[in-house]
Amino acid sequence: MTIRALLFDKDGTLVDVDRTWGPAAWDVMTDLAAGNRAHLDALISCSHYMEDERRFRASSPLLAGAPDDYADDWAAALGQPPDAGFRRDLSQRLGDAGLRHLTPLGALPKIFADLESHGLPIGLATNHGAGGARLQLRQLGIESYFNFVAGSDSGFGRKPAPGMVLAFAAATGLSPANIALIGDSFHDMHAAHAAGAVAVGVASGLIPYDDLAAEADLMIESLGDLAGLLQA
């Protein structure tokens, strides 16, 4: 296989899920619950959140989805209607909290400077919103490396569907077979395979190495190993 372009997942691949979204979600849940313990418990339950550890279980719908995927459950937990206003407010609150707690996985500016030397187009495919993703890339100091950013609101569908991968292929003029999708989840691996791309698993998320490796074409321990994989 010949890899000529790199498409990255965000959370669990570039961003530390536990240290970013664990405390971010706690901030938002406690703000919304406003001292009502029953509401807070309901939010914790439907989010598969571990209060004592301030992080999510791997089964949490917040890890692979956008706010629209769990807004109904959060609204029900709070006794509010899941209308457009609630959804906008939830998305804004989570985006702001995510930026406050944003924690990278590794020395990302150095990693991407090294990757840039290979001359490959670089893109992002996330099930979160594209605008918020760009803000995070900017805060992480790596936005300039990305030629393409697609989110759940970009019109290409959501992973594990292949739309974002196919859109990146169209944007680069490359065959999907020459694109590597690098991610930490089964959604990433399945999206790559559905598009005919190379699925590169990175063991930096919540899925055990061997479980993810069973779905991946190639595996790396961390993004720091990607440059070596490309050279090999």
Image: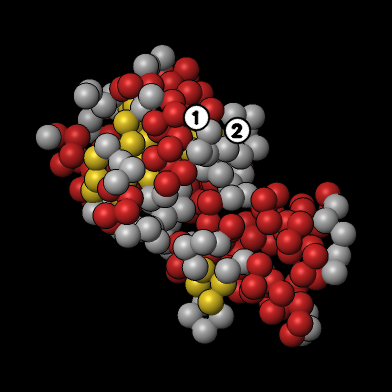
Residue under the point 40% across and 61% down: 206
Most distant residue in the left direction: 232
Residue 212 vertical position relative to residue 100 in the rendered view, above or below = above
* SS category of the residue bearing label 1: loop
Q: Which residue is mark 2?
A: 157
Residue 205 vertical position relative to residue 154 in the rendered view, above or below = below
Image x and y of residue 171, in percent = 47, 20
Quadrant location, the C terminus: top left
Answer left or right for 152 relative to 140: right
Image x and y of residue 70, in percent = 68, 56
Q: Between 202 and 149, which is closer to the camera in this rendering? A: 202
Answer left or right for 105 relative to 94: left
Give the Cα distance between marks 1 and 2: 8 Å
Label 1 neighbourhood size at 10 Å, few (<14), some (14-19), many (20+)?
Answer: many
Residue 136 vertical position relative to residue 98 in the rendered view, above or below = above
Q: Which residue is mark 1?
A: 162
Q: Amino acid at mark 1?
A: Pro
Residue under the point 83% across and 56% down: 82
- Is mark 1 in CB contact (under 8 Å) with mark 2? yes
* SS category of the residue bearing label 2: loop
Image x and y of residue 66, in percent = 62, 49
Residue under the point 36% across and 27% down: 197
Q: Amino acid at mark 2?
A: Gly
